[in-house]
Amino acid sequence: MEANENQSIEQTLVAFGERIRFRRKLSAIQQQIDMEAVRQEAELYESDAEQSGQIRSLWRTYRTTLAVAASVAIITTFGSIFLYRSYQQGHRQQEQQYSQLSKEIQAVKSSQKRLINDISGRSRALSANTAQVSGSGFMLTPDGYFVTNNHIVRDADSVYVQSARGEVYKAKIVHTDQIHDLAILQLCDDSAFKSMSPVPYSFDARTSDLGERVFTLGYPREEIVYGEGYLSSGTGYRGDSVAYQVAISVNPGNSGGPLLDEKGNVIGIISGKQTTSEGVSFAVKINYLFEAINGIPADSLKGQPLRLSRKNTLARLPRKQQIKRMQEYVYQVKVFKHK
Amino acid sequence: MKESRRTVLSDDELLKGLSTGSDEALTQLYRRYFPMILHFVTTNSGSEDEAKDIYQEALIVLYEKVRSGSFELHCLLKTYLYSVSRRLWLKQLAYKNRFLVNDIESQATDSAAVGQMSDDLNDHEERDRQFDLMADSLDRLGEPCRTLLEDFYIRHSSMQDITEKFGYTNADNAKTQKYKCLMRLKRLFFAEYKA
């Protein structure tokens, strides 16, 4: 134990001495070393030992530039998307503000089946093959000339009209006036059609005044619907002088219906409404109906001029009676198209 | 001394030179890896001086290990020195309460190196404690014992030189004196060391 301790203290002392001498050696080396060279080498170390550091320093250097570039790119992208969208939307809005009131019938297929009570073969065929577009129309003359909107019968394969009582007749398009959105049909082509008593309303070519109380009949659904309102402007959609603006509630299916004044004179034909505002509807002025009638080719008329009624038998009747007499002359137009 | 680059020694040659106490090998070793440690410490909130101290400490660890003959290198010498320096520096940072360390050498986490290194460092710490105590004991020993022991064990003076320096009549006398001093040192040392 004693000897052991003696030995260990000696060893420790020797080792201690060795360390001190080694330390001195190191300090001597340190003093001789060219620190500048070491520093430079350390710097070199940085560039090749820190590969990730290189990227990091690149990132540090170009961070702001990158951020600016990225934000510019983002702003440009979304900005142009936004601009394009808003432009498109504005465009579409203009197109959509005016909606033609023809009705896609598919939606009311089932109700139509229930409503038709005439079980003649033709109506059955009709109900089996529901029409694709429907609208309204009314008689011009008792011998079967009929007016509706051009947009309803456009591209039609076949056109049928159905009365309020459910009688269905095939119609032939005699003339279309695309500019004024009018179409003249003829029912007498169909052998089932028999001439009716003279139409009760007359056609008043004079320009009507603002505030004139007006009413219409049409088929926004399978049954005839009455609507009333007043003449709110002498021009139509976006100042269109062909039409009146009417404050009346109309719906898809009302297109082609007659617009009558209090006395029962037809002053226009419902043609569309502005979708962006409520109660703004448009009706083609009756003058353009006359123009359209004049434009019918003579051979289509088979030498018999189309004479419009000038005698108004509704004038003194109360509104309910007017409607009752009128509704026989207002038809639903059903159009079949080739898809 | 010029920076000797005449022959670039390999790790093994460096270690051999270190164990035989070759100045040439030590200088080359010192010069070769100092930049790495300098960079490591200075990029981890240390000064150049601190880097020097850490590096020298690491070299001492290596040197004493090599001298004891128990040194086995399981990785590159560079990695070993880096890991040791890193540990030492982390410890110092812990005292300073700063823990941010960016590694510049991925091998620092090499498990074999880490295992060996922590053993080495434990030994080193133990020795540090011993040496601190030794320095303390020598201080308390008083003259002329202290100088006598230092001359003999640290400066490796011969018994003859010591006899002359201290004016002893003969070498045997000096030896007896040295033995007495050593015994006193032993008492001082172990009184503290055991406690």
Image (cartoon, helix red, strand yellow):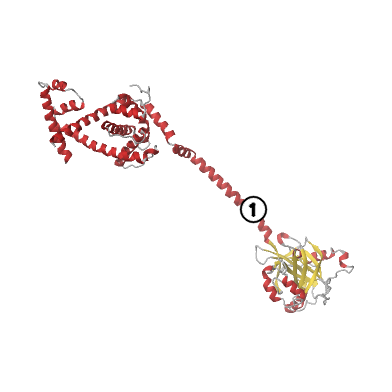
Q: Residue at point 56% right, 45% down?
A: A73
How many discs mark residues in the rendered view?
1
Q: Position of residue A233 (x, y in %)?
A: 71, 65
Left/right placement of residue B193 relative to residue A32 reads left
Residue A166, image quadrant:
bottom right
Left/right placement of residue A66 relative to residue B109 reads right
Residue A324, image quadrant:
bottom right
Q: Position of residue B6 (x, y in %)?
A: 37, 22
Which subunit holds the residue at mark 1?
A: A
Q: Position of residue A34 (x, y in %)?
A: 36, 25
Q: Is residue B131 visible?
A: yes
Quarter of the image with the C terminus of chain A in it? bottom right
Left/right placement of residue A310 relative to residue A113 reads right
Instruction: Identify residue type, mark 1.
Output: Tyr
Q: Position of residue A83 (x, y in %)?
A: 61, 51
Quarter of the image with the N terminus of chain A in it? top left
Q: Nearer the viewer, residue B171 or A243?
A: B171
Q: Residue at point 58% right, 49% down?
A: A79
